[in-house]
Image (cartoon, grey):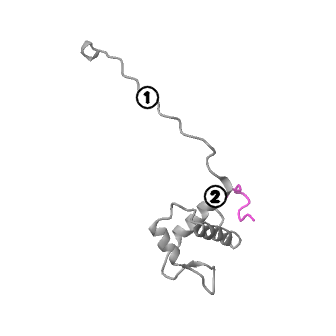
Amino acid sequence: MLSRPDKPVSKPYGFPTNLRTRPLILNQLERHLRERSLPWVTNDLLHEMTEFVHHNHGTSPRARDGSRDDRVMAAAISLEMFRLYGDIGGKRRSEKRPRRKPVAAYPWQRS
């Protein structure tokens, strides 16, 4: 489905939110909320969740007219990414090495 056959095909970035994936990620978010397994729900996210309602038309559920649902969708997509790819798998940052004292260049700096 190329509009320009002379251009190379590039990989799409981001998470594909469409009619198939949207209900899946929102149901997963709802399940985790009901189980109270999300320690990182902020007040702002909670407020947007209260504005996230079912509608009789269009993509449902979504934000109430005049409200936003960016944080809700970001939280749902984050949960899906964690479900798909999991945690880092035990990789840790290397511990910082203790700094060595600089070599004293002058007699009064030696102790």
- Quarter of the image where the C terminus is located: top left
Towards the viewer: 89 or 23: 89
Residue 77 rendering spot, x and y as whole percentages: 61, 63
The residue depicted at 52 percent of the width and 81 percent of the height is 64
Q: How many marks?
A: 2
Residue 10 rendering spot, x and y as whole percentages: 68, 56
Towards the viewer: 36 or 72: 36
Magenta region includes residue 4: yes
Q: Quadrant of residue 31?
A: bottom right
User: Residue extending furthest bottom?
Assistant: 56
Q: CA distance from mark 1 to mark 2?
A: 36 Å
- Quarter of the image where the N terminus is located: bottom right
Magenta region includes residue 49: no
The residue depicted at 58 percent of the width and 68 percent of the height is 33
Tell me the residue that label 2 is attached to.
Answer: 81
Please tell me whether mark 1 sits on a helix, a strand or a loop: loop
Q: Is residue 9 left or right of residue 102?
A: right
Q: Which residues are magenta?
A: 1-12
The residue depicted at 48 percent of the width and 81 percent of the height is 66
Q: Is residue 96 left or right of residue 26?
A: left
Check residue 98 in the rendering and tell me which mark sits there, or answer none: 1
What's the amino acid at mark 2?
Met
The residue depicted at 71 percent of the width and 71 percent of the height is 20
Towards the viewer: 97 or 65: 97
11 lies above or below 111: below
What's the amino acid at mark 1?
Pro
Please tell me whether mark 2 sits on a helix, a strand or a loop: helix
Residue 27 rendering spot, x and y as whole percentages: 65, 71
98 lies above or below 20: above
Q: Are marks 1 and 2 in contact (CB under 8 Å)?
A: no
* Nearer-N-terminus badge (1/2): 2
